[in-house]
Amino acid sequence: MQPDAYDPACPTRLVLDRIADKWAVLVLGLLAGRPTRFNAIRRAVPGLSQKVLAETLRRLERDGLLTRTAFATVPVTVEYALTPLGETLAETVDALRVWAETHIGAVQSAQRAYDSRLVEGAA
């Protein structure tokens, strides 16, 4: 069977769900090109809790997008790195982050215009 993301039974929807997650997008972009320790990721992404980061990293590891390496230190040091597959996805999803940063002003302006039309229509 040929993958078809428009088919509700297609497993590609699981991948789309994963990359539609804002935390996954930010983590993938952050890991692009360099292994990073757990706490460094947490510090680099304000608002991302330890629990959600751990869950996000586990899902990305399960999907074959990153590797987890534990070093025998006290306490244990854990480092995450993108796999070759993860590198291809990170490049793609980081373009979404760049687009969002570039166009946030236009999006917010459109939201304000839309909201003002709703308020005017309610009056």
Image (cartoon, rainbow, N blue to C red):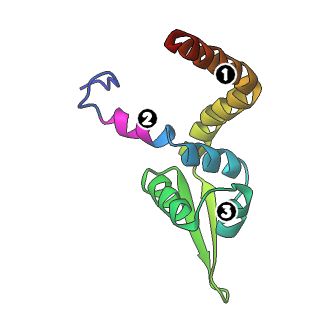
Q: Mark 2 vs mark 3: give the one in front.
A: 3
Earlier residue among tags 2 and 1:
2
- Quadrant of the rendering where the N terminus is positioned: top left
Q: Residue at x 23, y 31 (%)?
A: 9
Q: Marks 2 and 3, Cα distance to the nearest angstrom?
A: 24 Å
Q: Check the image and name the residue furthest to the bottom.
A: 74
Q: CA distance from mark 1 to mark 3?
A: 28 Å
- What is the spatial separation of the Cα atoms under label 2 and label 1, in whole angstroms? 23 Å
* Image-quadrant location for residue 10: top left
Residue holding disc 3: 42
Q: Label 3 sits on what residue type?
A: Arg
**SS assignment at label 2:** helix
Residue 104 at what x, y percent from top left?
71, 27
Q: Are marks 1 and 3 in contact (CB under 8 Å)?
A: no
The residue that mark 1 highlights is 107
Residue designated by label 2: 16
Residue 56 appears at what percent x and percent y? 50, 56
The residue carrying pointer 1 sits among few (fewer than 14), some (14 to 19) or many (20 or more) residues within 10 Å by Cα, namely: few
Query: Toward the viewer: 57 or 111?
Result: 111
Q: How many marks?
A: 3
